[in-house]
Amino acid sequence: MPRLFTALEIPRNAAMSLSLLRGGLPGARWIDVENYHITLRFIGDVDGRTADELVERLDRIDRPEFQIRLDGIGSFGSKKPHSVWAGVTPTPDMFALQGEIERICQRIGLPSDPRKFTPHVTLARLKSSRLDDVVHYLSGRGNFQTSLFTASRFVLLSSRESVGGGPYLTEEIFPLHEARTFPAAASNELQPVKSMV
């Protein structure tokens, strides 16, 4: 069974902005543009029955779509950096979705994820990059930011590659519903009527 994880997709225009960050860092293995994503929950290798139960429960999630912006870049591994990433401006709706997926995973018997959810898009994996080179690379690109985009769905991805970084295959798609907005006039109607007595 392939390794599974849930993720948010990166639209083409944001992915093209991310692709401009490629290069200029010795020892970096750059992620292919079509494999950019924001991991919500790593699931790992599971049997077919568990995968089916997971899909059935994920399909019941009823949450609104939300806006995302990619903002800033950084690296994981302070003294010996192992990856470079683009940051994601956190939103309550994204954290609520991630939390619900985490609870579903635990209910079907998967161990809790020991890592704190830190939304990001991995840009490169670093094999032999020197700390000085990483610091220099990051210092020239710290003001990176994309326009807002809408996360209208999340996906279940699989990877058969042992090293990580793709290629990823979309196994299932789970739509988020359109955010409900209430016109100002409608909200006034909900106010109690003052008595003239």
Image (spheres, rainbow, N blue to C red):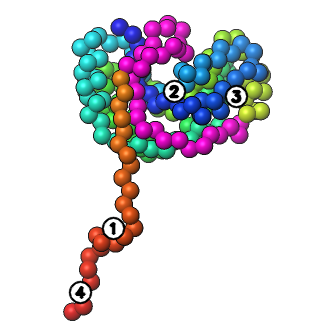
Assign the C terminus to one quadrant of the image: bottom left
Identity of the residue drawn at 40% across and 27% down: 155
User: Which residue bears the numbered disc 1?
Assistant: 186
Which residue is denoted by mark 3 in the rendering? 20
Q: Neighbour class for label 4 at 10 Å: few (<14), some, many (≥20)? A: few
**Could you tell me if the residues under marks 4 and 2 are in contact, i.e. CB atoms within 8 Å?**
no
Callout 2 secondary element: strand
Q: For this view, does 74 lie left or right of residue 181?
A: right
- The residues colored magenta run 142-171
Q: Nearer the viewer, residue 74 or 11?
A: 11
Is the Cβ of the residue at disc 1 closer than 8 Å to that at disc 4?
no
Query: Where residue 134 appears, x then y in whole percent?
Result: 73, 23
Task: List x then y, in percent, for residue 188.
Answer: 34, 72
Direction from residue 149 to residue 173 in the image, left or right: left
List the residue tagged with mark 2: 37
Question: How far apart are the two marked residues, 4 and 3, measured between alpha carbons?
Answer: 63 Å
Query: Label 2 is placed on what type of residue?
Result: His
Amino acid under disc 3: Leu
Task: Give SS at disc 1.
Answer: helix
14 left or right, relative to 21: left
**At 62% across and 40% down in the image, what residue appears?**
146
Residue 195 tag number: 4
Assign a secondary structure to mark 4.
loop
Quadrant for residue 163, please give it: top right
User: Distance of mark 2 from mark 1, alpha carbons?
Assistant: 38 Å
Task: Inspect the image, locate mark 4, and give the three-letter code of the amino acid beneath it.
Answer: Ser
| Mark sitting earlier along the chain (1/3) | 3
